[in-house]
Amino acid sequence: MDSSSEFGDRQHPKFHQASPARIFHWVNVISLFLMLTSGLRIYNANPVFGGRGGYDFPLLMTLGGWLAGARHWHFAAMWFFSLNLLWYGVYVLVSRRWKHRYVGSNDIKALQMSKNSKRRIYAWHRIVYTSIIPILLLALFTGIGMYKPAQFPWIVDFFGGWFPLRVVHLMTVPAVLIFAIAHSLLALKAGGDRLVNSMFWNQ
């Protein structure tokens, strides 16, 4: 949770997010939306569950119009998403924000011993924030294996074949959605809608 707060009064705190954090959130939301909607169109071309006769998502929920078009959208958004993660990761390391943005031993102790509800919320937020890192890396890793199976056959083999690879990649979608909901709810508990809005807007 990349925020600092300034208090005009105790009842109306003002939160400020660093510009890189706001850019990161905006690019993530846009690229994830494009990957999700185009991914559903790709899924419809060959459903993971049920084969050709499996469930199709409504066209209004998809992007790309056809399989090749959806793939173009999906992989273009993937590059924006990947580069966004890369530069923000470098920013977090260089600025040393990782020291107080991700879960640490103090957060585990806070959950076990602290009676301060606000402190416990921050601890849960850092745990959730940290948990999304392996999920996103898994989504990219499996996505690369599906995108270039001839160049990276070891990725397909690592997951036990093409079908398990597709299932794992698909399961990262609800995992990211659950993270987004938990991230937003914890931010609301920690600082209300002002904190959530500060992730996207300069207040």
Image (cartoon, rainbow, N blue to C red):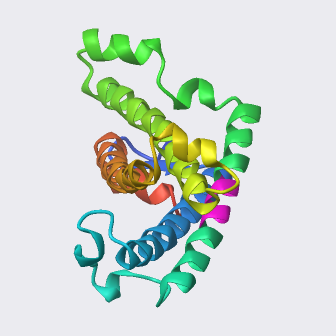
- Locate residue 123 relative to residue 38 in the image: left or right: left
Q: Main secondary structure of the magenta part?
A: helix
Residue at 46% of width from left, 90% of height from top?
65
Toward which corner of the image does residue 4 lie, by quadrant?
top right
Give the x, y percent position of residue 168: 40, 48
The residue lying furthest to the bottom in this view is 65
Question: Is residue 3 in view from this perspective?
Answer: no
- Residue 117: where, in percent of width, then height? 25, 26
Does 203 lie within the magenta span? no
User: What residue is shown at x 69% (from left), y 29% (from top)?
Assistant: 96
- Looking at this view, is 67 or 58 the one in front? 67
Q: Magenta segment, which residues?
A: 78-84
Q: Residue at (42%, 56%) from the top-left corner?
A: 166
Name the residue rendered at 54%, 47% in the picture.
Answer: 156
Q: Is residue 103 left or right of residue 51?
A: right
> Image height check: is 203 above or below 192?
below
Q: Nearer the viewer, residue 187 or 71?
A: 71
Q: Is residue 79 magenta?
A: yes
| Residue 154 at least partly seen | yes
